Image: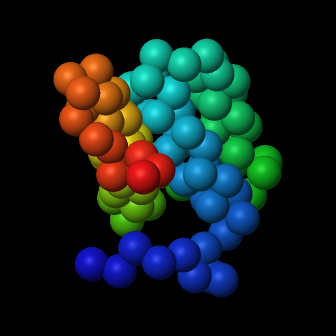
Amino acid sequence: MDFSDIERTPKNLREVEAEAVALICCEALNLKGADYCRGYIQNWLYPSVGYNGDGIPEKSAQKIFRAADRILRAGQLTANEGTNETRQIEMGQPSAFALG
């Protein structure tokens, strides 16, 4: 599947996609800002802004979930790496970043 953003994607739909990714990440990480994200998405989906559909198109939904998944997985890897390094230091094992 092609998830690239093309120039033909309307600005309002690009805004919805980006803010929906932010919403998913905020909710998944229990961060403040989800209410703002919802309002922003609703504003860009409002018909007078130029969107004339009933909801978020399937292709956009796929892009949203894929981007959010990649961000959240990257955060988990970073968190796990930090945890592993902390454990190694606590156990007296040298860190890969230790100066010798």
Left or right position of 11 against 91: right
Which quadrant of the structure image shows residue 36? top right
Where residue 97 appears, x then y in whole percent? Answer: 42, 50
Which quarter shows the N terminus? bottom left
| Residue 52 shows in this picture | no
Tell me: 65 left or right of 14: left
Picture coordinates of residue 54, whole percent (x, y): 49, 47
Q: In the rendered view, how is the structure colored?
A: rainbow
Using the image as rendered, state which of residue 72 and residue 42 is in the foreground. Answer: 72
Looking at the picture, does residue 81 appear above or below residue 6? above
Q: Closest to the observer: 47 or 100?
A: 100
The x, y position of residue 38, in whole percent, is 60, 28
Callout count: 0
Quick check: 66 above or below 32? below
Residue 20 in sight: yes
What residue sits 47% from the left and 78% below the top? 4
Residue at the right extreme?
48
- Residue 5 vs 70, above or below: the answer is below
Residue lying furthest front: 100
Q: Nearer the viewer, residue 89 or 5?
A: 89
Q: Residue at x 64, y 22 (%)?
A: 33
Compared across the picture, whether 16 is left or right of 87 comes to right
- Residue 100 is situated, as x and y percent measured from the top left of the image, at 42, 52
